[in-house]
């Protein structure tokens, strides 16, 4: 009986401990950069859902500036409350019925309602936190045929700036979902020009309890993102 030939010198059997380690994606640097909290309000009326953001007043004029110095930005969205609830820290602030007149449309009635809440906020902070406090004491008129019923939601977001989301040269906001504690990959999404797309993509890929990252960009950067989605911004 012939003996088996000796093994080739270069032949080596890998032991279990020698198996290559599984691939570990590099953590998204945005998770350590976009850590500054901000709060947006989403207002849902029978005709639309709109995000509201009030920029803080500058430190030099905080005590004397009129109400109009709080720049009020409104961004229409198409998300249902069931989708907005997927955002981590979402809070339902309640339903309010606003008085309306024949001369007021929904937008005017809502603007007047929040203007009454923003008044006399003189310190250099984003007014959203104070508005939320004042909403808890705002009267909730019973629904009437002539009144406008609105739902108000608080939506926490995180950005790369501690101050105003609309700083120098910023005209638009872009959005990105993140879920760093997810067991699955990916843990972050693309930068989107619409909040709707960011939340919908996050729901599809990661479920609920999503963090929402936000960044202010120029109009030129915004138009570029419409054409090419990216995971990182310069």
Image: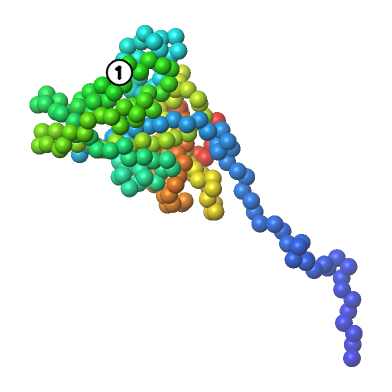
Near mark 1 (Cα within 10 A), the count class, few <14, some 14-19 or many ≥20, is some
Q: Position of residue 12 (x, y in %)?
A: 82, 67
Vertical relation: 8 (above or below) 23:
below
Q: Position of residue 109 (x, y in %)?
A: 20, 27
Counting the numbered discs, the total is 1
**Residue 12 in view, yes or no:** yes
State the image quarter where residue 41 is shown. Answer: top left
The colour scheme is rainbow
Lateral position of residue 173 relative to residue 94, left or right: right
Residue pointed to by mark 1:
119
At a point 18% along the width and 30% down the height, the residue shown is 98
At a point 45% along the width and 45% down the height, the residue shown is 210
Q: Position of residue 130 (x, y in %)?
A: 36, 25
Q: Residue furthest front?
A: 137
Vertical relation: 20 (above or below) 77:
below
Quarter of the image for the C terminus: give it: top right
At a point 44% along the width and 35% down the height, the residue shown is 157
Q: Position of residue 160 (x, y in %)?
A: 52, 29
At a point 55% along the width and 36% down the height, the residue shown is 30
Lateral position of residue 176 relative to residue 144, left or right: right
* Element type where label 1 sits in the image: loop
State the image quarter where residue 172 is shown. Answer: top left
Vertical relation: 177 (above or below) 73:
below
Quarter of the image for the N terminus: give it: bottom right
Q: Residue furthest bottom?
A: 1
State the image quarter where residue 23 is shown. Answer: bottom right
**Residue 198 in view, yes or no:** no
């Amino acid at each position: 009986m012939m003996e088996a030939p000796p093994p080739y010198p270069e032949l080596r059997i890998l032991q279990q401990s020698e198996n290559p380690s599984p691939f570990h994606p590099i953590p998204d640097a945005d998770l350590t950069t976009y850590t500054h909290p901000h709060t947006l309000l989403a207002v849902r009326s029978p005709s639309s859902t709109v995000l509201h953001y009030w920029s803080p007043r500058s430190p030099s004029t905080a005590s004397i500036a009129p109400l109009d110095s709080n720049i009020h930005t409104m961004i229409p969205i198409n998300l249902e409350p069931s989708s907005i609830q997927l955002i981590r820290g979402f809070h339902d602030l309640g339903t309010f019925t606003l008085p309306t007149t024949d001369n007021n449309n929904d937008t005017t009635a809502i603007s007047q309602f929040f203007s009454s809440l923003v008044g006399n906020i003189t310190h250099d902070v984003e007014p959203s936190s104070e508005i939320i406090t004042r909403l808890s004491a705002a009267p909730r008129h019973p629904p009437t045929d002539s009144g406008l019923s609105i739902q108000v939601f608080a939506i926490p977001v995180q950005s790369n700036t501690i101050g105003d989301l609309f700083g120098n040269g910023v005209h638009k906001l872009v959005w990105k979902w993140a879920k760093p504690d997810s067991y699955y990959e990916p843990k972050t999404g693309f930068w989107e020009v619409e909040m709707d797309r960011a939340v919908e993509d996050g729901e599809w890929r990661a479920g609920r309890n999503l963090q929402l990252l936000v960044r202010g960009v120029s109009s030129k950067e915004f138009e570029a993102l419409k054409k090419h989605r990216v995971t990182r911004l310069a």
